[in-house]
Image (cartoon, rainbow, N blue to C red):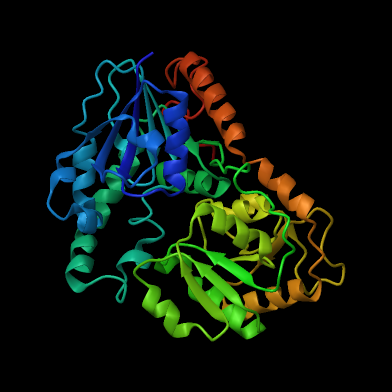
Amino acid sequence: MRVALVHDWLTGMRGGEKVLEVFCELFPDADLFTLIHLPGTVSPIIEARRIRTSPASRLPGIARSYRNLLPLYPWLIERFDFRGYDLVLSSSSCVAKGAKAAPGATHVSYVHSPMRYVWDRYDDYFAPGQAGFVTRTAMSFFRGPLQQWDRSSAERVDVLVANSEFVATRIRRYFGRRSEVIPPPVDTRLFRPTGDAPGGEWLAVSAFAPYKRLEVAIRGADLAGVPLAVVGSGPHESRLRAVAGPRTRFLGWVPDDELVALYSRCRALVFPAVEDFGIAPVEAMACGRPVVALGRGGARDSVVGGRWEGDPGGVESGATGLFVDEQTPEAFARAIRAVEADPDAFRPEDCRGRAEQFDTEVFRARIREGVERWMGEGPPGAPGGGPAGPGNPAAP
């Protein structure tokens, strides 16, 4: 069986690239297609593939400006030639699912998110204050056509796989399709308790993007009077530093071994974003630490939320964190104080046990079993065909 792997772009190691790593390991002879590849920015496992890129990858300065080419990407992804491949397996948060498999081939798309830039996260990227006038004007023109393409290209995919129930809901809303949910992998052999006793410092781990709402975590920790370590970087660092108090320290991105130590020693992770899935909560739990998270988005898939801090019943047995109802510093400060008042309410073994359900080997086994099943079910819409294909639309 000839396999083609498709990924939006290779410009750094994030959650999507961890998924792609497993795909590369499962199909070591597969060719890898991507719009843009910046050599040296992804793991050796990925770099060792035969990587085919679009013409955009050769443009001067593409490392700084690749996000500005969004309106061109649907056209570019459709130019790749997949004749001769039996399986096209795409990892998509933007346009990779738009790859056109050859007639008779099967296209399985692992969807990290519908194209968030043009759907529910549009204002996070293109509202006044987030983008310049020219960019906002251009996107107001391209948004409609991009939405139409995102929806129509999903109809070509044989099997859609969502990384969370939250993303599966968005796939139903925007594409009118069902999807199978397989959460992304976390290496729980790497992320594990170090044996150090947790201290009083809280932790936030995130890229510094507007929709991550890190200012909520920073101000919430400050209101609660607790120290906060922030791991990450990004274009909004100056804004975040402007709202930080003296108890907050910015560490930038740190090596994995240092991150494991930070997780293991922290009081808890604070996670204020509405994420498609969210890897950081699982990493924290793998290290035995609980999570205070917004009760929306992908965190609902991973964190076992205890009762709200105002409930006299306290924290439920087996809980691995608290869910916050409001995305405000005041609400997060209340939850932080609740954990501070009873730091032993969350058992490290419960947190660790929950994280192990998302281990890389679990993901690998589910994808391997899924591919065997999807390839054997026949074309979607045929008798016994694929459960998420065009012939099997979303349930009402």
Q: Which of 169 and 269 is in front in this view?
A: 269
Can residue 11 be seen in the rendering of this structure?
Answer: yes
Quadrant location, the C terminus: top right
- Identified at 37% across, 78% down, the residue is 238
Vertically, is 97 above or below 295?
Answer: above
Q: In this view, does 67 lie to the left or right of 7?
A: left
Q: Which of 106 and 218 is in front in this view?
A: 218
Q: Is residue 278 left or right of residue 338?
A: left
Q: Which residue lies furthest to the right in this view?
A: 313
Vertically, is 389 above or below 199?
Answer: above
Give coordinates of residue 182: x percent, y percent.
Answer: 56, 37
Vertically, is 40 above or below 106?
Answer: below
Q: Quadrant of residue 56?
A: top left
Quadrant location, the N terminus: top left
Vertically, is 313 above or below 68?
Answer: below
Give coordinates of residue 159: x percent, y percent.
Answer: 45, 29
Can residue 389 be seen in the rendering of this structure?
Answer: no
